[in-house]
Amino acid sequence: MHDLPLASIVILTWNARGIVGPAIDSALAQTVGPVEVIVCDNASRDGTAAFVAARYGDRVKVVWFPENLGYAGGYNRALALARGRFLLLLNPDARLDPDFLEAALPAFDDPRVGIVAGLLLRPDRKTVDSSGQFLARSRKTIDRGFGRPLDPARDRDGPVLSACGAAALYRREMVEDIADGGALFDPDFFAFHEDLEVGWRAWRAGWRAVHVGAAVAVHARAGGERAGRVGLAAVRPPEVIAHIVKNRWLTILRHDRAASFLADLPFILAREAAWQAFLLFRAPSVYRHLWRHRGAFGRAWQRRREDRTRAGRWGAWRRGVPPRGIWRAGESAP
């Protein structure tokens, strides 16, 4: 066991030949180790896998998938190949500071910490992309500090619910503890909101997530778009919008509780009304794609029933809902 890597940095690509190089370089440049770097390619058409293999040789393990499995399915397959004690999922449009792992790993000295969210900055290194994720009363994913100037007094270290999937660091024991049949991510998600769902699931299992501001990464995030705005969906294909809408409801269906849902119903309905107005008047074809995914809702309900009797390293799973909104920096994890 002594020759196993300290951490595995896994990069999932799809037509990312032109942007993935800096992400791989930053993974190889980490100041602690040993670190293994794995690039898994989701059936790219631009030769990403061949490019990475030719450029990096045996310094990087390259795996090519014959079909696009999405973020959820691709990372499930990729994580099965990883051997590290800690697992860092890195977007191809993100790059780590050399001391990212060195700064982040001490947080795991607390045996309850299963997720570490570093400080994700935009390319100008002055604007925050995410300093940890939270759950809004509307059930929207909140990336703390998103699009605002970096303010160390506001974006302090402390408890969060989850880590943005662009650079999410997980403890292997947590992944194994909360996995569904060996898979960390729900494959029905394909892409979008799977990072928040994992954080909610981990919270229910008794694990903690923390933000460590000294662990810095830069994330371009699709050219710097603003998150959480329904209007941005207008530029996405209908099949992609369908995943965004579907995954919000899959998360609610699996994890929400009736009392909390009813207490927050005005906020939930307000957001849902905005989405439905957009779909009806701007993207009605999304409903056709949602119908194709209708089986996912039955599977989410089945997982909800199974979760009632689940127990793990920290005992029986909670049946409550984590605090909504941004938790106060400095308080203990709920």
Image: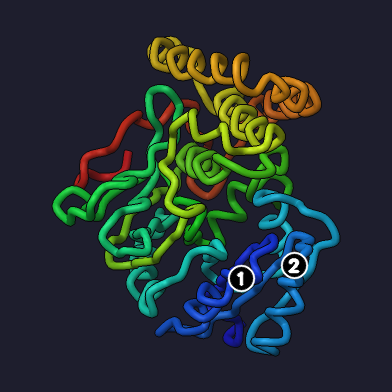
Lower sequence index among marks 2 and 1: 1
> What is the crowding at mark 1: few (fewer than 14 residues within 10 Å), some, or many (at least 20)?
few
* Residue at the (68%, 23%) spot, across then down: 301
> Does residue 328 appear in this view?
yes
Q: Nearer the viewer, residue 143 or 111?
A: 143
Quadrant (top left, top right, bottom left, bottom right) of the N terminus: bottom right
> What is the crowding at mark 2: few (fewer than 14 residues within 10 Å), some, or many (at least 20)?
few
Query: Pointer 2: what residue?
Result: 46
Where residue 239 sits: x, y (%)? 71, 35
Q: In which quarter of the image is residue 81?
A: bottom right
Residue flagged by tag 2: what amino acid is it? Asp
Where residue 70 sits: x, y (%)? 70, 50
Tell me: residue 103, above or below residue 235. Answer: below
Tell me: residue 283, above or below residue 206. Answer: above
Q: Which of 42 and 236 is in front in this view?
A: 236
Q: Quadrant of residue 89?
A: bottom right
Q: Is residue 171 left or right of residue 180?
A: left
Q: Do the residues labelled 2 and 1 touch (CB within 8 Å)?
A: yes
> Does residue 308 appear in this view?
no
Disc ID at residue 18: 1
Residue flagged by tag 1: what amino acid is it? Gly
Task: Say what secondary structure mark 2 lies in.
Answer: loop
